[in-house]
Image: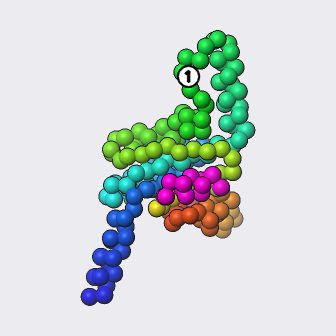
């Protein structure tokens, strides 16, 4: 009887998931299908929203803004009338675009949240600001010796994220 109650209790807790965040890095192109599938598998049964979290370096953000402004100066007019925000730049990255395509195909609701700066700090900030119930992260392939440790961003998120973290490993790990 206790085991049945425990299972029911755990199932109820799982259905309380309202927001799942998928952290997407610029190097996630090879594994984005697997990461997005994990987010969909977690979010869809709970009718949860997926936050696509992407963090740019501060230098990348500044370079993109400078290039945009230079292009506007050449054309003489800002036809898009947009500010170059981290969210705008995130939408243009290949891994984020692929994740959007997968989410749209399954009708799972999603939002894009992005930042600039330290990846672990920004992803934690985004997760906390959006009351994320579960953060999904992937890791880079590591050498045999390097498999004993996670990458620094992954390790910091596993230890310091404001919510539970799901680590999706590469097939070769």
Q: Is residue 68 left or right of residue 21?
A: right
Q: How many marks?
A: 1
Label 1: how many residues lie within 10 Å, few (<14), some (14-19) or many (20+)?
few
Q: Nearer the viewer, residue 143 or 112?
A: 112
| Residue name at image x 71 percent, y 34 percent | 62
Residue 139, above or below 3: above
Q: Is residue 150 visible?
A: no
Q: Nearer the viewer, residue 91 or 78?
A: 78
Q: Is residue 145 left or right of residue 94?
A: right
Toward which corner of the image does residue 159 lie, by quadrant?
A: bottom right
Assign the N terminus to one quadrant of the image. bottom left
| Residue name at image x 50 percent, y 54 percent | 130
Q: Nearer the viewer, residue 19 or 103?
A: 19
The secondary structure that dominates the magenta segment is: helix
126 falls in the magenta region: yes
Residue 65 location in percent, x, y? 67, 29
Residue 74, above or below 173: above
**In the rendered image, which residue does mark 1 sit on?**
81
Residue 13 location in percent, x, y? 37, 70
- Range shown magenta: 121-132
């Amino acid at each position: 009887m206790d085991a049945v109650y425990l299972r029911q209790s755990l199932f109820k807790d799982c259905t309380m998931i309202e927001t799942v965040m998928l952290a997407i890095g610029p190097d996630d192109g090879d594994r984005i299908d697997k990461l997005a599938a994990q987010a969909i598998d977690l979010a869809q049964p709970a009718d949860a929203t997926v936050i696509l979290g992407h963090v740019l370096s501060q230098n990348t953000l500044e370079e993109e803004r400078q290039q945009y402004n230079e292009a506007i100066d050449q054309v003489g007019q800002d036809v898009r009338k947009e500010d170059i925000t981290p969210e705008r730049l995130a939408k243009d990255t290949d891994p984020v675009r692929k994740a959007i395509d997968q989410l749209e195909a399954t009708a799972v609701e999603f939002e894009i949240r992005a930042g600039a700066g330290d990846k672990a700090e920004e992803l934690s900030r985004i997760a906390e600001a959006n009351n994320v119930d579960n953060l999904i992260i992937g890791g880079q392939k590591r050498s045999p010796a390097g498999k004993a440790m996670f990458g620094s961003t992954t390790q910091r998120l596993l230890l310091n994220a404001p919510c539970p973290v799901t680590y999706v490993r590469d097939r070769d790990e």
